[in-house]
Amino acid sequence: MPIDDFYLNVLADVSPKTKVTVSPFLGRDGRPVNVSGGQAWAIPKGAKHAEQACRFARTMTAADTWLAAAKARKAALDAKGSFYLGTNTGNSKADAMIREQVLEPTGNAALDAGVKVLQAAQEQAVPLPATAAGAEFKIAYTDAATRVLEEADAAAGARPGAAGGAEGHRQGLRGDEVTAAATEGVPPTAAEVATSRDRRRPPRAGRGTQQRQQTRAALLFISPWMIGFLVFTAGPMVASLVLSFTGYDLVSSRTGSVSTTTASLAGDPKVLTAVRNTAFYTVLHVPLSMLVAMLLALSLQRLSRAQGFFRTVVYLPVMTPPVAIGAMFLLLLNGRTGLVNEVLSWFGVQGPAWTTDPSWIKPGLVLMSLWTVGGTAVIYLAALKDVPEPLLEAALLDGAGPWRRFRSVTLPMISGTVYFTLIVNTIASLQTFSEVYTMYFGNAATSSGSGDAALMYAVYLFQQAFQFLHMGYASAMAWLLFLVVMVVTLVQVQVARRRVYYEEADVATADVAVTAPPSGSSRPPVAEGPGRRRRPVTKVLWVLVVGLLVLLLLYPFVWLVSASLKPRSEVFDNGLIPNPLQASNYSEVWQTTSLLTWLVNSVVVGVAAAVAVTISSALVAFGFAYFRFRGRNTLFALVLGTMMLPGTVTMVPTYLIWNEIGLASTQVPLWAGNLFASAFYVFMLRQFFLTVPRDLFEAARIDGANHWRLFRSIALPLARPALIIVLVFEPAGEPGPTW
């Protein structure tokens, strides 16, 4: 890479009077240990004009070309009043010509001395090949150099990266001086640069002081969640834990012993039935929903102009309230008159009794859950858009087909998002409640016909707590569920340590070995062969495929609208055209209910909840993603743990808190809890923040940006797709607890 892409040239350009000391990176034997690497021109296999491309590459790397570029660069810097410090081209002849004909003393003894040190380091450096192995070695070397420099700085009590080894410490630089370490022949990103922007200040404190400063800043960012956890989660959790060791009955106020509650839980056959049903549903729902969502996202990604429309349609089912989904699919899955069985009959298949046959009730619930995978698909689509295009193009140049590119490039790059949806979908499946309760336990006809085949663990917990008022027993069930979910999540976390890849800064800043952009270009050249260019027939085919999927998602909506215009006696008729048309259903709803008031309340609560949870969750997620402080992993595990505790358990203690404040009968409890962040959105946003290249933050810190500026000017703009998802998801979800 050219020297003038690094810190020494940046300092000479923006602050030419800055005093700088450049020291070589020394090994254990006291000799310089430097490597040099860069990029290379590549000609794609099967290129139409390979010979011309080869001549072009030779011309661009010739010594005369580099000399002309150096002269132009020097003239531009001279016009600005800045200094030209040379260019390391990788061509020894060109380097010698530039030093003899272009490079001149700057008049700044420190800069001139630094240039000489860098030149000597480059001459002594071990060259790295422009291959994938060379790029990996460069990353490993930079990480090792960073650790050595930080250890030396910590031992000397100076700011990490502010001095380039022991020599820099011995020189006792003032606050307005800079020391850079010359590794890789040039100052790498591992060698941080400290500058005072032309103002005096005392030397930085030691590593321990910096660690405390980082911890204080991190705690400030995550304070919304900590306050909410202490007030609205930890207290109710402790209360429910105490109740779980008793046989507390809300009606008779009796209490039992721990052994009595444990024996009742272990001897209750319905608990075992609910566990089996929930496990069966989770094992089917989680992989199928993730697979369907990924297929939807990949299909949407291939669209261009129509992508926004299809994305909106795919997300529509997520906007549907769970109670409405349960009621709608109770009709669609009807064994005799349901739309699902009618569609199966078109292909000669006799559909089962989805809502009454115990063997088909749980598969029917899984089928219903697949209708709402649009939310996961939108998350995957946002992650797919963040996959670095140079990596896909490099794989294409190496001859990788679509499946190989997805398996070896795309899937590893979005593995953090896939991991996120795996954990969230697993937790949600183990706590599934609303749709199941609406279909089979809020309706006397279906509850009697389904038996215990639809009894999920969260449903039985709710029955014990709020129908039978056995609060102690329900609390014990809740904590049992909490432990099960915790164990499952910990297993997933252990697997993720080996399977999940986070970009951090490496992929975004590492050199792509097989290609290199020409000067002034942001993307490497890629062949426009048949494998790259999309044919019109392929585009039409993808539009038809996505259109068919969208039709399947929209059809229940169309059927529901049609049913709303039918007389009650004709609702189970699957014809889409109402006959006769009865629009009076809508007028009756408008006249007999306070529909307008409900709509206004929903909008106010939804908007307030969305804005509050987006801001607070973004702050907390940034605190966990950016800062490195002691106890971070423990705190984040606690955040995940709050997602695993069923909300029904903490509902009563939370209500008592709001009632004590005097706000229980207002809308405030429905959205005010979002001011303290949501564990779900903290987890999701943290995944996005972890993909932001860390070099961007380091560069901003060098420019004097504080932590708030990093969050506002770098993290938030780059995580905009995730923030939009939160703003859209939250109003569509169920608001806070309803008392």
Image (spheres, helix red, strand yellow):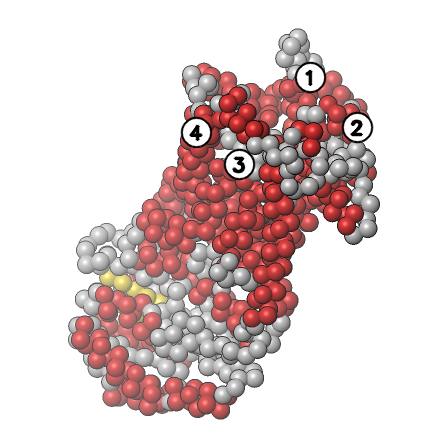
Query: Which one is earlier in the sequence, the residue at label 4 or at label 2?
Result: 2
Mark 1, Cα crowd under 10 Å, few <14 / some 14-19 / many 20+, is few
Which residue is at 22% across, 58% downward? 197
Amino acid type assigned to the residue bearing label 3 in the image:
Gly
Q: Going 33% across and 87% down the picture, which residue do you hit?
A: 65
Label drawn at residue 733: 3
- Which residue type does callout 1 highlight? Phe
Q: Any mark on residue 449, and which?
A: 2
* 106, above or below 263, in the image: below
Amino acid type indicated by mark 2: Gly
Residue 272 appears in the rendering: no
The tag earlier along the polypeptide, 4 or 3, is 4
Say what secondary structure mark 4 lies in: helix
Q: CA distance from mark 4 to mark 3?
A: 16 Å
**Mark 4, residue position:** 600
Mark 2 or mark 1: which comes first in sequence? 2
Give the mark toward the camera: 2 or 1: 2
The answer to which quarter of the image holds residue 613 is: top left
